[in-house]
Image (tube, helix red, strand yellow):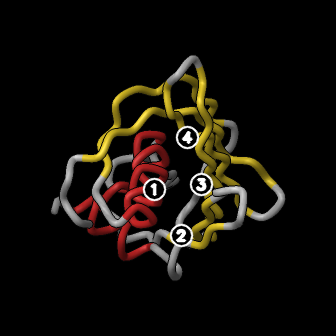
Amino acid sequence: MNKILQGIAAASQGTVTSDEAGTLEGRYCFTESFAGFAGHFPGHPILPAIVEIMVVVSLVGEHMRCRQRLVAVEDAKFLNPVSPDQELLVCCRPRTVKGKLLYDAKLTVGDTTTASMLIELASNGETP
């Protein structure tokens, strides 16, 4: 497992929860030492957009108990930066669009939406 994936796992603030509608929820807190902040940006670290996507992939994988791989990003909006030591709430729900199973995710810090995305995933058969 690479440093970014290890860092995402370490940032997890507990187990993934789900409700009757299938909405998944997880909380993450990335410290300033997280590898994804290195060079992004010196003196003003922010969580890279690709890491925000990887957090959703990790969340689904943890819930499914099977590693997921990113197939496509159907839509993504990165609205506000995530800084070190902020609690990031990730809510994600499965949705079928044109016959494809996609995951609709919203990431927030407090009352502020940091990102929203619609992504397609596939299982790679490995346990996380």
Q: Which amino acid does label 4 sit on?
A: Tyr
Label 3 vs 4, first from the N-terminus: 3
Q: Mark 4 points at which residue?
A: 103
Q: Which of marks 1 and 2 is nearer the N terminus?
A: 2
User: Label 1: few (<14), some or many (≥20) within 10 Å?
Assistant: many
Work out how far the residue at label 2 is from the one at label 3, CA to CA, in angstroms: 11 Å
The nearer-to-camera label among 1 and 2 is 1
Task: Give the Cα distance between marks 1 and 3.
Answer: 20 Å
Residue hosting label 1:
60
In the rendered structure, which amino acid carries the disc numbered 3? Val
Estimate the x, y position of residue 69 in percent, counting from the top left.
Answer: 29, 42
Labels 1 & 2 near each other (Cβ < 8 A):
no
Which numbered disc flags the more N-terminal residue, 1 or 4? 1
- What is the quadrant of the C terminus in the image? bottom left
The quadrant of the rendering that contains the N terminus is bottom left
Q: Mark 2 points at which residue?
A: 28
* Helix, strand or loop status at disc 4: strand
Q: In this view, does 74 lie to the left or right of 95?
A: left
Q: Residues within 10 Å of mark 3 (few under 14, many from 20)?
A: many
Q: Distance between the residues labelled 4 and 2?
A: 18 Å
Q: In this view, does 26 lie to the left or right of 128?
A: right
Q: Residue shown at 69%/37% (left/top)?
A: 79
Locate residue 64 relative to residue 104 in the image: left or right.
left
Q: Are marks 1 and 4 in contact (CB under 8 Å)?
A: yes
Nearer mark to the viewer, of 4 and 2: 4
The residue labelled by disc 3 is 82
* Residue 49 drawn at (x, y percent): 48, 40
